[in-house]
Structure formats: structure tokens, C-alpha cells
Amino acid sequence: MTQFELLFLDSLEVPVVIRAFSAHDDLTALREAERLSKTHTIEVWDGARRVARVKKGNVALVTEDRQSL
């Protein structure tokens, strides 16, 4: 089991909530972020490694989003 952090970002990309989440793998953590992304963009972190970024409403990422990564 891996301990992930889910960072809920506001419109300025500032974390407003950080939630600890235990999961078996990256994909499970990503699914949780997708489920919770109705109100905020969420980044999934495993320690210092960013696993994923899910935009608010789980909107598809586009080329311009690369700047945020």
C-alpha cells in the first residue's frame, strides 16, 4: 500500500486542501482523483513524485496544460 497525497488546487493553482490517500498503485490513486475532481483540479503525489494531474470536472488535458506539469 502506498501513501499518496491529493492536492486540491484553486483557480490560481494554489493547494487549498491536501488529503492523504492510501492505494495499491498509481492507477487507483488516479481514479480517486478523477472521482473527486468535480470542484477542483487535483494533483496526485507520491512523495516528491507527481503521479498525475486531473483538471476540474475531469476535463481532458491539452497541450497548454503542459506548463502546469
Image (cartoon, rainbow, N blue to C red):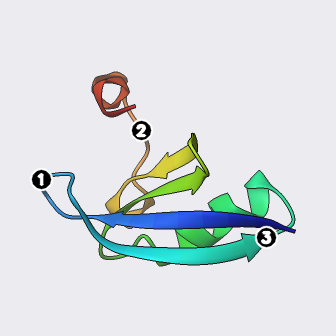
Residue with the mark numbered 1: 12
Report crowding for label 3: few under 14, some 14 to 19, many 20 or more residues within 10 A (C-alpha): some
How much space separates mark 3 and mark 1, taking CA atoms? 28 Å
Point out residue 10 in the picture as x, y percentages from the top left corner: 19, 64
Contact between marks 3 and 2 (CB within 8 A): the answer is no
The residue located at (55%, 65%) in the rendering is: 5
In the figure, is residue 23 to the left or right of 64? right
How much space separates mark 3 and mark 2, taking CA atoms? 24 Å
In the rendered view, tell whether residue 59 sits above or below residue 8: above
Tell me the quadrant of the picture where the C terminus can be found: top left
Report crowding for label 1: few under 14, some 14 to 19, many 20 or more residues within 10 A (C-alpha): few
Of labels 3 and 1, earlier in sequence is 1
Identify residue type, mark 2: Leu
Tell me the quadrant of the picture where the N terminus can be found: bottom right
Residue 55 is drawn in which quadrant?
A: bottom left
Identify residue type, mark 1: Leu
The residue located at (29%, 24%) in the rendering is: 67
Point out residue 3 in the picture as x, y percentages from the top left corner: 71, 67
How much space separates mark 1 and mark 2, taking CA atoms? 17 Å
The residue located at (21%, 51%) in the rendering is: 13
Point out residue 14 in the picture as x, y percentages from the top left corner: 20, 57
Residue with the mark numbered 3: 23
In the rendered view, tell whether residue 5 sits above or below residue 35: above
Of labels 1 and 2, earlier in sequence is 1
Residue with the mark numbered 2: 61
SS for callout 1: loop
Kindly identify which numbered label has been placed on residue 41.
none
